[in-house]
Every structure is written in C-alpha cells, then in structure tokens.
Image: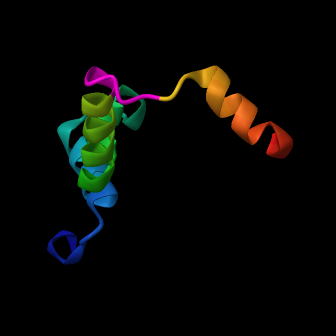
Amino acid sequence: MIDKISDGNILNAVKTLLSGKSLSQADWWDTISQAERAEIEQGLAEANRGEVTPHAEVMAKYKKWL
C-alpha cells in the first residue's frame, strides 16, 4: 500500500511513524512538500538579496481589505 502513495506529506507522516517518533516530535520541515520547501527557499533567497517590501507598505496597500 505504501508504494502506491504519491502524496509526499503522507509519506513523510508514515516515515515519522515508522521511525518511532510522534508527529509532534517531527521537524516541520520534514512534513511539508518539496514544492513548499522550494517556495520557502526562494523567499529566503529573495530576502537575502533585499528583494522585500516593507510591512508598512504592504499594510497600507491592503488596508481596505484587512
């Protein structure tokens, strides 16, 4: 059954269970998908290059929806 699972999150959960750790002990990084990891890494790289928008500017722009 396990070899038919294609969802990475489920596979990580199964791996955690089989390793003897509880899900609460699992590192959250190991529980997210590869796509989510890639997006986080991209965001960190952009921030390191200074490609960010100040919080105040974002809040002012979206104030009418918040």
Q: In the image, what residue occupies the spot 30% across and 32% down?
A: 46
**Viewed as shown, does residue 65 lie left or right of 11?**
right
| Residue 39 in magenta stretch | no
What residue range appears in magenta?
Answer: 47-52
Give the x, y percent position of residue 8.
26, 59
Q: Residue at x 43, y 28 (%)?
A: 52
Is residue 49 one of those drawn in magenta? yes
Q: Quadrant of the C terminus?
A: top right
- 60, 41: nearer the viewer: 60
- In the foreground, 41 or 65: 65
> In which quadrant will I find the N terminus?
bottom left
- Placement of 54 over or under 35, stated as above or below: above
The majority secondary structure of the magenta stretch comes to loop
Question: Residue 60's x, y, as percent?
Answer: 74, 31
Number of numbered markers: 0
> Where residue 64 sits: x, y (%)?
85, 42
Q: Is residue 32 visible?
A: yes
- Judged from this view, the residue extending furthest toward the left is 3
Say which residue appears at 50% left-offset and 29% top-offset: 53
32 displayed left or right of 62: left
Q: Would residue 17 be seen by someone viewing this image from the given angle?
A: no
Residue at point 24%, 47% (across, down): 38
Colour treatment of the image: rainbow
Q: Position of residue 45 (x, y in %)?
A: 24, 31
Is the residue 4 above or below the residue 36 in the image?
below
